[in-house]
Image: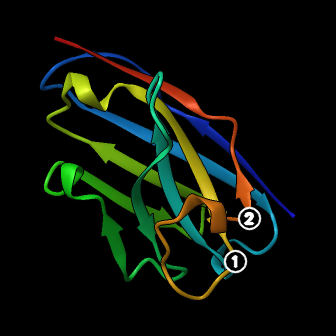
Amino acid sequence: QVQLVESGGGLVQAGGSLRLSCAASGRTFSSYALGWFRQAPGKEQEFVAAVSRSGGTTDYVDSVKGRFTISRDNAKNTVYLQMNSLKPEDTAVYYCAADLAAVLRVDGRLYDYWGQGTQVTVSS
């Protein structure tokens, strides 16, 4: 079992920055990949970013490349999503998820554990 708790969401103006954190507990942290997903009102869940077990490999959806950075600290059992140059279209509930598979995946249906989400609102 893996428990995930997100934090760091809030209200920010366009062009601003936020850093989301996701603290994990339970299963050995380095034994699973981690991803961030988001869901805006009336829209389907969207993959945002993922990081491998070691932190050495990452993947991003095209719309956030160059603006968002995913990282993990295996000593602190925490994964981060640094979000810069935020846009109103980034407004959504952001979820952290854990995937026990050995490869990075973008399909949220394949992830095994989920946090409760944190709201990010970007005003124009």
Q: How far apart are marks 1 and 2 (CA)?
A: 7 Å
Name, please, the residue furthest toward the bottom.
Answer: 102
Asked if residue 69 is positioned above or below residue 59 in the image, the reply reads above
**Residue 95 coordinates in the image, percent (x, y):** 56, 42
In front: 54, or 52?
A: 52
Q: Residues within 10 Å of mark 1 (few under 14, many from 20)?
A: some
Say above or below: 105 vs 88. Answer: below
Q: In this view, does 32 lie to the left or right of 112?
A: left
Provide the secondary structure element on which disc 2 rests: loop
Quarter of the rendering occupied by the C terminus: top left
Which is more N-terminal, label 2 or label 1?
A: 1
The residue that appears at 17% across and 48% down in the rendered structure is: 67
Residue pictured at 32% horizontal, 46% vertical: 82
Left/right placement of residue 81 relative to residue 90 reads right
Residue 30 sits above or below residue 35 on the image: below
Residue 50 at what x, y percent from top left? 44, 65
Q: Give the amino acid type for the residue marked by disc 1 in the picture.
A: Leu
Q: Is residue 16 above or below residue 84?
A: above
> Which mark is drawn over residue 112?
2
Q: What residue type is labelled 2?
A: Asp
Seen from the viewer's position, the closer of residues 109 and 5 is: 109
Question: Disc 1 vs disc 2: Cβ atoms closer than 8 Å?
Answer: yes
Tell how many labels.
2
Q: Name the residue under label 1.
A: 100
What residue lies at 48% left-to-right and 48% top-to-bottom?
Answer: 37
